[in-house]
Image (cartoon, helix red, strand yellow):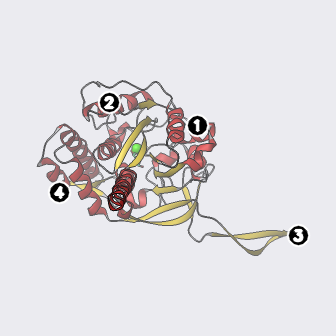
């Protein structure tokens, strides 16, 4: 009897561990977006993740087009059970910059998906984030892969979510130069004030920036792999990826960077990347550097004190890290994970 009881406890412990340990609850905040599409489909087809909501932010396309794209994609994936909510309509303090130039007129590489069977959730994106975080304290990971407007709005409205969020895995930023210009990465450039709010909030941030995204190039080889299998998601992603590979070729690159999918990859398996703890600030004023993520790699700043007509260095002050910045990636392992999750779906 005692032995039976002991076994039951062991089983219960095992199953409760695998239930909580095996899946990570995420809120996917997105500006869909061709690589957003690949990221969403990776998330929806990965058993390690439980997508609790999709919140839409303007960026690659307008808020309206992004919402339509998100709804069509969850419909294609037969996942009308996932709430899809509209959020901010524009960045906090600047005009919206959209990127149809890179993502196609509809944002989805000009691939026309059938109209959605799924309906929009009536809740406001930032409010939905707040609600879900409170409903599952310490259990929700935010995965924003667009400008950080919705996340900043949620934080401003309810700062008490900070200690309740498990992790914030951001696709954005760079410590080695930008893709919009010399300094700034697009998601941060498109709402620098929101990004600064999110980086300084005091929660656990993982920055999946251009430094690693630029190393994960999906190439013709991966397209061929995807072309060997079929299914509605497989075929949609093949078309999107093929458009992006062709576009990259025009700019001399052998493949398309998997920026947003890699952020999802890190949520699935953090061992895909190597990260270093740094303090990251977002430049909001610089003439050439607005939107740059400025990372302190030494963890220190000099203390300059005014002595008469000059400053004198009196010592060095420690700077606490506020983010884990991804600096290296096992690119091919990630790309094979992506292909294996999408293949045949
Ligand atoms: C980021 O900008 C967007 O165009 C992509 O979707 C990605 O989130 C890369 O800089
Ligand atoms: Ca994006």
Residue 134, how many percent across, how many down?
Answer: 54, 40
Circles 2, 3 touching at the beta carbon (< 8 Å): no
Considering only order in the chain, which callout, 3 or 1, is on the residue closer to the N terminus?
A: 1
Q: Residue at x 48, y 54 (%)?
A: 173
Question: Callout 1: 10 Å neighbours few (<14), some, many (20+)?
Answer: some
> On the image, numbered disc 3 is attached to which residue?
308
Considering only order in the chain, which callout, 3 or 2, is on the residue closer to the N terminus?
A: 2
Residue 204 appears in view: yes
From the viewer's perspective, is residue 52 above or below residue 199? above
Circles 1, 3 touching at the beta carbon (< 8 Å): no
Nearer the observer, disc 3 or disc 4?
Answer: 4
Q: Quadrant of residue 232?
A: top left
Which secondary structure, mark 2?
loop
Question: Callout 3: 10 Å neighbours few (<14), some, many (20+)?
Answer: few
Residue lying at the far left of the rendered structure = 228
> On the image, numbered disc 4 is attached to which residue?
221
* C-alpha span from label 4 to label 2: 33 Å
* C-alpha span from label 2 to label 1: 30 Å
Considering only order in the chain, which callout, 1 or 4, is on the residue closer to the N terminus?
A: 1
Question: Callout 4: 10 Å neighbours few (<14), some, many (20+)?
Answer: few
Considering only order in the chain, which callout, 1 or 2, is on the residue closer to the N terminus?
A: 2
The answer to whether mark 4 is within 8 Å of ligand 1 is: no
> On the image, numbered disc 2 is attached to which residue?
80
Q: Quarter of the image for the N terminus: give it.
A: bottom left
* C-alpha span from label 2 to label 3: 68 Å
Q: Nearer the viewer, residue 11 or 145?
A: 11
């Amino acid at each position: 009897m005692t032995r039976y009881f002991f076994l039951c406890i062991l089983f219960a412990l095992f199953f409760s561990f695998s239930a909580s340990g095996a899946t990570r609850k995420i809120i996917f905040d997105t500006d869909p977006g061709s690589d957003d599409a690949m990221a969403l489909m990776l998330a929806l087809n990965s058993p390690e993740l439980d997508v609790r909501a999709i919140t839409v932010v303007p960026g690659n396309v307008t808020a309206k087009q992004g919402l339509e794209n998100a709804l069509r994609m969850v419909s294609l994936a037969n996942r009308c059970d996932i709430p899809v909510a509209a959020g901010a309509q524009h960045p906090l303090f600047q005009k919206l910059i959209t990127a149809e130039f890179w993502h196609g007129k509809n944002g989805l590489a000009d691939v026309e998906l059938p109209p959605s069977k799924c309906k929009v959730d009536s809740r406001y994106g930032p409010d939905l984030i707040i609600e879900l975080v409170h409903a599952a304290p310490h259990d929700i990971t935010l995965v924003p892969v667009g400008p950080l407007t919705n996340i900043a709005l949620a934080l401003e409205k309810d700062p008490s979510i900070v200690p309740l969020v498990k992790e914030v895995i951001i696709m954005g930023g760079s410590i080695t130069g930008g893709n919009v210009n010399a300094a700034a990465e697009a998601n941060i450039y498109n709402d620098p004030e929101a990004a600064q709010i999110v980086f300084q909030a005091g929660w656990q941030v993982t920055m999946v920036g251009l430094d690693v995204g630029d190393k994960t190039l999906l190439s013709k080889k991966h397209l061929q792999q995807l072309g060997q299998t079929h299914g509605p998601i497989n075929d949609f992603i093949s078309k999107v990826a093929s458009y992006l590979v062709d576009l990259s070729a025009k700019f001399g690159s052998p493949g398309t960077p998997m920026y947003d999918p890699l952020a999802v990859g890190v949520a699935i398996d953090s061992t895909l990347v190597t990260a270093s703890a740094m303090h990251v600030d977002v430049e909001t004023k610089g003439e050439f550097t607005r939107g740059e993520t400025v990372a302190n790699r030494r963890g220190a700043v000099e203390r300059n004190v005014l002595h008469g007509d000059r400053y004198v260095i009196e010592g060095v002050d420690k700077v606490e890290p506020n983010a884990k910045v991804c600096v290296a990636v096992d690119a091919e392992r990630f790309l094979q994970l992506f292909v294996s999750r999408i293949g045949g779906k």
